[in-house]
Amino acid sequence: MKTSWIITFFGCFTLLSIHNRSACQSTVISIADGNWTNPATWDCNCIPLPGDVIIVNSDVVLDMNWSTDSSLTVTPGSSLIENGTRTFAVYGSFINNGTVDISRFGVWGGSVINNDSMRINQAFYNDAEFENHDRLVDIDSMTNAGTLKNLDSAYIFVQLYTNSDSMVNEGTIMAGGHTNMGKSYNSGTLNFTDYTNAGTAYNSGTLFFNDFTNAITGTFNNSALITGTNDFLNAGTFSNLSTGSFTIARDFYNSDGTAPGWALFLNNGFVEVGDDWLNVDSVFGSTGRFCIQDSTANTGMMAGTFDFCDKTPPASQPFIDFNTGTIRPGITWCTQSCNTGVTELRDDGYRLRVYPNPAIKSYIKIVSAGDPIYKIEVFDINGRMIVSKDDFSGNDFNIELTDFQKGFYLFRVNDKPIQKIIVE
């Protein structure tokens, strides 16, 4: 015990001598704009220690790599911005109420709460607790091995995103590529170019994708809206619940690649496929319906009482282009309408009607059946705001499309969750 005390004392004494300090741990507050390593930036006229309680109360330039074992808070209107390429590691508490701009940010213990703007332009790693209530943007690579919560109307923009533990999204997350190997809960908006689910995912919000693979180990439950511009492959277990709507612009493929296969697609909602539909394994459902634009083929099992509508069917039953599998007699054929073109979106007790969507005219009309519209924002697929209007009040608004290129766009009404429009 005596030896340990002596080592601790002299270790502390050495650090204090170097940093001109009078205590092993203290609260250090920035009082001037300047570099982190400039003692004049801080009220102690010293350089902070990793164990200090640090309050950034001005515009501080991070000119060295840093880790915090205690706590760091950036106050409203203040900033912590790197010069060069810096690494910041959190082992304690980090709260941002201002602006943070750092290339590499790791959370190895404790917790991080972001209430304003964070830009991490290279790598972000979370192995603890991270809560985002505002903006987390421009990330090249993001890995969550802890708990990540994107709450309120917050948004995250990232190129590559891997989740291996727990993610909760109430806001908006946009990613070039996303792999879920843990648990994912979405009640907001997800927009992924390439999406692979190898874990467990629940969607009660809105999901957009270019290509979507539900892997052999994947379990996906959809009770809301999913829209894809390319292909969908299910090799695991996918449940489209009674309130679920799933639109695939190109091909639907249900197979795990083995014989016999165990891929299961359960449809009690609505599934629309713009090109080809192929089932090799098992498709079940009781109240669901499929609407297929082009070729259809079944070499597996189709069972239940769902409705199946091939818009270009053969002349006789089963109304499917190619069948060497099993189709149970409870399946019905085109008994329900496949008409689309008006999108209805419900949020917080009021309803928005968006039409025509996809848009083939020079405008899209948004009509609110409840609260007046007082603010409209439109973003491109990269998250850049291209329209912002807050100088009117009414229950309908036209978004002019004259200068819009073909593709996906996102819009937000009255700071509610982001939704999608398509321009063709």
Image: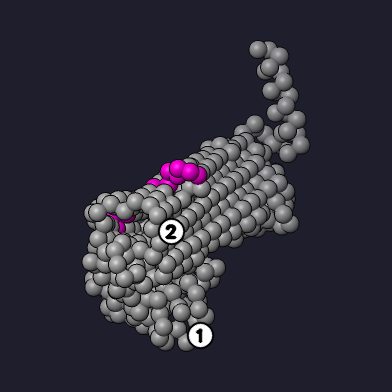
Q: Which secondary structure, mark 1?
A: loop
- Residue closer to the observer: 151 or 228: 228
Q: CA distance from mark 1 to mark 2?
A: 38 Å
Position of residue 163 measured from the top left corner of the image (x, y, whole percent):
52, 46
Quadrant of residue 70 within the rendered picture: top right
Residue appearing at x 69%, y 36% in the figure: 21
Disc 1: CA contacts within 10 A as few (<14), some (14-19) or many (>=20): few
Residue 411 vs residue 5, the one in the foreground: 411
The residue nearer to you, when weighing 343 against 24, is: 343
Give the residue number, with chain letter if any, for mark 2. 278
Whether residue 146 is visible, yes or no, is yes
Quarter of image, res 16 = top right
Residue 97 is situated, as x and y percent measured from the top left of the image, at: 50, 54
The residue tagged 1 is 403
**Amino acid marked by disc 1:** Asp
- Give the residue drawn at x 55%, y 68%: 382
Residue 134 on image: x %, y %: 47, 58
- Residue 112 located left or right of residue 376: right
Q: Secondary structure at mark 2?
A: strand
Span colored in magenta: 258-269
Magenta residue check for 193: no
Give the residue displayed 26% in from the left and 67% down from the top: 334
Magenta highlight: main SS = loop
Give the amino acid at mark 2.
Leu
Does the rendering let one see residue 135?
no
Q: Give coordinates of residue 217: x percent, y percent.
A: 48, 42
The N terminus, quarter of image: top right
